[in-house]
Amino acid sequence: MRYLFAFLVIVTSFNCNYSFAHLDRMKSMDHSRNSHMNEKKVISITIKTINKMTFKDLGYEAGKLPSSWETINNADVNIVNVHEGSYVVSATNSQVKQTLYFRIDDDGDVVAVSENKGF
């Protein structure tokens, strides 16, 4: 009986290790990440990212944004291009006359933020 229990523990630990070792594969199998993106969601993601970027540098090329970016609304955000499963979105801050470009993949992840759209 003791050997059976030890065997089950070992087999179970191998199975768990495999699951945690390949999270990148699990992401592609996760059905909740299917592409259900539309213009409204892309614009919402862009505005949320801008608001986060006014508080801290998220590691994108554009860096931390000044507080004037907090006033951005839907009218200031436009989808420039949809290409190969990603969206290129522009956001314009009329107060400082600056435009940022966001590349958002089909899963809703912000891939890049730049002052030019040459991703």
Image: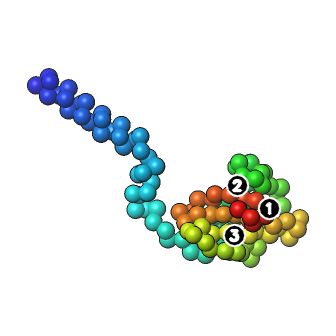
Amino acid type assigned to the residue bearing label 2 in the image: Lys
Which of the numbered marks, if any, corresponds to residue 102? none
The residue pinned by badge 3 equals 89
**CA–CA distance between discs 3 and 2?**
17 Å
Bin the neighbour count of mark 1 within 10 Å (Cα to Cα): few under 14, some 14-19, many 20 and up.
some
Q: Where is residue 54 drawn, in percent x and y?
A: 76, 54
**CA–CA distance between discs 1 and 3?**
11 Å
Kindly check if marks 3 and 2 are in contact, taking CB atoms under 8 A apart as contact.
Answer: no
Q: Where is residue 84 drawn, in percent x and y?
A: 57, 69
Along the line of sight, which residue is nearer the eye, 36 or 85?
A: 85
Amino acid type assigned to the residue bearing label 3 in the image: Val
The residue pinned by badge 2 equals 52
Which element carries disc 1, helix, strand or loop?
Answer: loop
Residue at 14%, 23% in the rendered image: 2
Residue at 43%, 57% in the rendered image: 28
**CA–CA distance between discs 1 and 2?**
17 Å
Amino acid type assigned to the residue bearing label 1 in the image: Glu
Which of the numbered marks, if any, corresponds to residue 115? 1
Residue at 42%, 51% in the rendered image: 25
Check the image and name the residue furthest to the left. Answer: 1
Question: Considering only order in the chain, which callout, 3 or 1, is on the residue closer to the N terminus?
Answer: 3
Question: Considering only order in the chain, which callout, 2 or 1, is on the residue closer to the N terminus?
Answer: 2
Which element carries disc 2, helix, strand or loop?
Answer: helix
